[in-house]
Amino acid sequence: MRITRLILGLSAAATFFVAACGTTEEPTSGAATASTAGPVTVVDSRGKEVRLPGPAKRVAATEWNAVEHLLSLGVAPVGVSDIKGYGQWVSAEKLDGTAKDIGTRGEPSLDALGSLGPDLVIVTDSVTEGALEQIEAKVPVIVIKGGAAQDPIAGMYANLDTIAKATGTEAKAAQLKSAFEQKLTAGRAEVGKLGAAGQKVAFSDAYVTSGSVSIRPYTQGALVSAVFGRLGLESAWTMAGDPAYGLAQADVEGLTQLPDVRFWYIANNAEGDPYQQELAGNAIWRNLPFVKSGKVHRFPDSLWMFGGPKSMEQFVDAAIGALKG
């Protein structure tokens, strides 16, 4: 579940495209074809110009935000990292079963990628530069940001626009952004009607390491928290998050710094719920003010916290549902 670094071994990169030679598989994406559109130049998150002979048709993506963007734009990716995990954590845009699994998000299988003969690979900005250079010698690679804590929603839009330009789907991207803005406006009005404007929310997830529960606060710089902010809700977290995702670290003792706020969190039955399981009998947890007052709310499964407009629309609905509940 946790965001991982994309590690591409340099020794393996040399063999990346061997299996792709002579591939005859037909494109499956919904992007425009090179025969109907001219060359495309995209400036990615590095500031690098990536030139394509036409809108990309066969696209592989290593991170789920890029996968969701592609699907939202009507482009079926030919390769996706950790397809099983995507199905467990992302429900806003479902895969149609045609994509091939290219391994983990942290270490995709270079042989699997090469066998697909992609004309574009989308990675996040954690890819190692040496491997990236070797891949780019054979196929265009677009790098997008995993997160942008200074302005998370703008960062999400920037990633969407970059992928849309590369695949010739700019009009669809504009529709997605407009629909999301309308969703935020309607959601903010609903929060006002519920008398919840200005209320503080502490959103987090948690995981277990060596028997200890690690809590991950989504601070003011997190994408989900930015969405809540647009709804008129304030983040209750006072600590700073990391510069990419706006994520911080805490333990159950650290939660004692929170007053009687709304405590919202996300978990997944596939990986368990540390709050309901490991912390159920913890005296510190049971005596927290928001636990005692019944303000703890678990969001529905399979809402991707680092996704695109469609996932964030789900968070708008989940927030309104939590306020009504």
Image (spheres, rainbow, N blue to C red):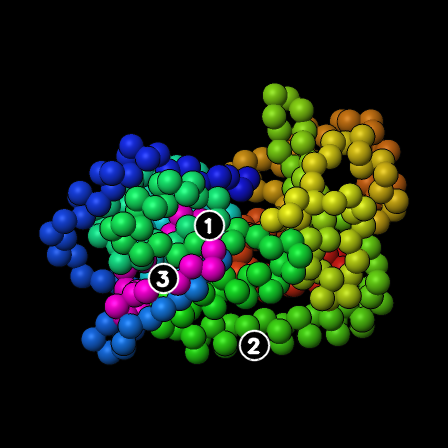
Q: Amino acid at mark 2?
A: Ser
In the image, 235 versus 9, the foreground residue is: 9
Which residue: 76% across, 27% down? 281
> Start and end of the magenta stretch?
46-69
Residue 181 point in image, percent of width and height? 62, 73
Query: Does 142 sit above or below residue 6?
Result: below
Q: Which residue is mark 3?
A: 50
**Mark 2 — residue?**
178
Which of marks 3 and 2 precedes in the sequence? Answer: 3
Find the distance from the CA under tag 2 to the CA under tag 1: 25 Å
Amino acid bearing label 1: Thr
At label 1, counting other C-alpha atoms closer than 10 Å, the crowd grade (few under 14, some 14-19, many 20 or more) is: many
Position of residue 125 in the picture relative to residue 233 (left or right): left
- Of the residues tagged 2 and 3, which is closer to the observer? 3
> As displayed, is residue 226 above or below residue 215?
below
Q: Where is mark 1, residue-wise?
A: 124
Observer-nearest residue: 47 or 111? 47
Q: Secondary structure at mark 2?
A: helix
